Amino acid sequence: MDAYKLHRHILCIDLKSFYASVECAVRKLDPFKTPLVVADAGRGGGSIVLAVSPYLKTLGIPSRLRFYELPEDIDMIVAKPRIGLYLEYSAKIIEIYLKFISEDDLYVYSVDEAFLDVTEYLTYYKMTDVQLAKKILDTIYEETKLFATVGIGPNMLISKLALDIESKKAPDFIAKWTYDDIKDKLWPVEPLSEMWGIGYRMEKRLNRLGLIKIGDIAAYPVQELKRQFGILGQELYYHTHGIDMSVIQHKHNIRSKHKSYGIGQTLFSDYYVPDIFQIILEMVDDVSRRLRLSKKVAKTIHLGIAYSKDIGGGFSRQMSIEQPTSSAHEIYSICLSIFNKYYQDEPIRRVHVSATNLSESHVYQFSLFEDPEHIIKEQNLLHAMDEMKYKYGKNTLNRASSELKSSTTKARNKMIGGHHA
């Protein structure tokens, strides 16, 4: 096991209640004393609360819930999401990181979380990893008035575990773990989903094997885990021992080689057939346009459908085709095939469409059953539409069906990440 241990100095930094803290910062309010939620109340009680302030978290209010689930006995500030503003703050934070380290040693995990490999900088700054972490957190607060937490470890996994399990509760928001801490700090953790990388479904399957605490997985035969869960089971075993061979500097190459295009949206109300077809078509148009702009074609199309919360469930399926495509017509036909095969006449609240298994769109091989002239005309028309949307805005040209009440495309085109800019 020792042969697989990395000995780096990795910081995993997370911005506390990011969206809510940004809203507090621009209002010059203390997020630890302010009852603020980020949500679009105009969407109705079923809209998702994107974030709650640290103060509300101390009252037991979770960071993700529906608007109608908020307690009515607390006078809260309801901030409408401003995704453009949050992205500006995220960019400022990245600029701060780059004042301390190079881009090669930074891995941006999400809009509010990043990994920093500071191994080669400690001698330069004449600091320990803890001291440098504190300096970075102080700089973030001085320049943005945002609070951050940091986990420190010898690899990316342990730094993330230190962040999630200990640093967020630490007085100075800093926690450092070593391999020696795994037994005492990680193994007692339960439920299993408290560990990064274990989802709700995986937890249930592990529980059925009698594995309740993380230490139970660490003591379970690795070959049996591999038999039950494949390579993920083997990886999970090593993770419970703190072993992770991921290197930040390698992730830049990995991200550039493996890419997909997808879009998902939670609907304002329950949708049924035939209105849901309009939503799927609009999302296919979006994915198809992004494929064309990047000069890519996709061989595998994925459709995910989630039913209303009261019903639960749904399906997530994909289909691969022989000839890679960026055609909206073809992708929509594939999505319909998947939908008709697996849909169970339940109310739909979320849809996801993605295109994977990408390749460059250098050459198109026409089949015997295709009209080359028609396809070329269609491609030229679509490229012209793409140029107009790029130059004058996404709502410059839309399908006539975008005027239907069931359509969401015009509203989504005014948003960033599914929320108002």
Image (cartoon, grey):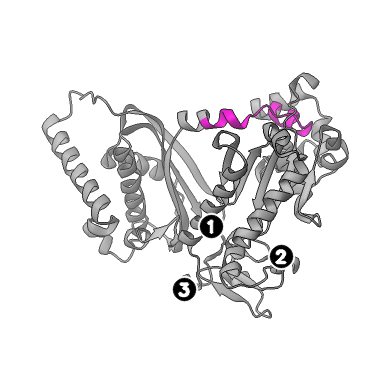
Callout 3: SS: helix
Residue wearing tag 1: 89
Name the quadrant containing residue 181: top right
Q: CA distance from mark 3 to mark 2?
A: 23 Å
Label placed on residue 42? 3
**Local crowd at mark 1 within 10 Å, few (<14), some, or many (≥20)?**
some
Which residue appears at 68% of the width and 62% of the height?
62
Q: 128 or 155, which is in the foreground?
A: 128
Reading the chain from its start, which is encountered first: label 1 or label 3?
A: 3
Label placed on residue 57? 2
State the quadrant of the C terminus: bottom left
**Local crowd at mark 2 within 10 Å, few (<14), some, or many (≥20)?**
some
Callout 2: SS: helix
**Span colored in magenta:** 234-252
In the image, residue 392 sits, relative to residue 10, either above or below, namely below
Q: Position of residue 57 (x, y in %)?
A: 71, 65
